[in-house]
Image (cartoon, rainbow, N blue to C red):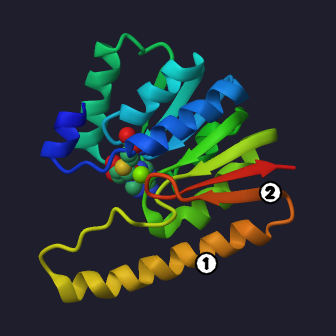
Amino acid sequence: MKEYANKYKVPIIKDEGLIFIRDLLKIKRPLKILEIGTAIGYSAIQFQNSCDCEVYTIERDETMYNEAVKNIKLANLSDKIHLVFGDALDIVEDFKDMKFDVIFIDAAKAQYLKFFVLYTKYLNDNGLVICDNMLFHGLVLQDNYDELSKSLRGLVKKLDAFREFLLVHSEYDTTIYDIGDGISVSVKK
Ligand code: SAH
Ligand code: MG
């Protein structure tokens, strides 16, 4: 899966970040995890392996989704990892009868605040919200530099605002770790 991700430039989680989150999951022992941003299913499979939990994971890109379906079948985890095809911003209500112990946010960076606000209503007390790419090191500028640098500035601003939002949130204790591409862990008080 790593080779595929490399070849097609799929931004799967970095090794150090993954080791850190796997350790957290081994301690936390969640029964249910919700992931926003499946890509090819790499992190979902790794999380499932580390704590034998059930994983619900959302992906809006059809190619990624299909690749994830394939990988999860190959890993024999179709009964443990539930792939949901759709835009996470549109399908919040699909989860209305569920509660999660961990929510992992790893989709469009500009929308982190929205994902957090929409989905934390499904978080159990003492649950964790973990976000990837909070420090944004992994970004490489390509092709259209001017275009990108402008939208990039917007993105960085949004991530900054989200970081601030987390740090001052009265219902969560948040730490941002300089591991991998930056990982935040927010514990619901
Ligand atoms: N968690 C994966 C990597 C995810 S990459 C891993 O570490 O293995 C981010 C993915 O989020 C991309 O595949 C992208 O298509 C998806 N995505 C971005 N915004 C989304 C949204 N609003 N709803 C659902 N998926 C989204
Ligand atoms: Mg990521």
Residue 150 against residue 87 in the figure, above or below = below
Q: In this view, does 123 lie to the left or right of 182?
A: right
Q: 86 or 40, which is in the foreground? A: 40
Residue 8 against residue 24 in the figure, above or below = below
Helix, strand or loop status at disc 2 = strand
Q: Quadrant of residue 154?
A: bottom left
What amino acid type is highlighted by mark number 1?
Answer: Ala
Residue identifier under label 1: 161
Q: What is the x, y in percent for residue 167?
A: 74, 68
Q: Can residue 59 be seen in this view?
A: no
Q: Is residue 83 left or right of residue 26?
A: left
How many residues crowd around disc 1 within 10 Å: few (fewer than 14), some, or many (20 or more)?
some
Could you tell me which quadrant the N terminus lies in?
Answer: top left
Residue identifier under label 2: 173
Q: In this view, does 38 lie to the left or right of 80?
A: left
Residue shown at 80% from the left, 57% from the top: 172
Q: Can residue 78 be seen in this view?
A: yes
Q: Earlier in the sequence, mark 2 or mark 1?
A: 1
Q: Quadrant of residue 54?
A: top right
Q: 75 or 95, which is in the foreground? A: 75
Q: What is the x, y in percent for residue 148?
A: 26, 81
Q: Is residue 123 left or right of residue 146?
A: right
- Could you tell me how far apart the alpha carbons at marks 2 and 1 are, in whole angstroms? 17 Å
Residue shown at 72% from the left, 29% from the top: 28
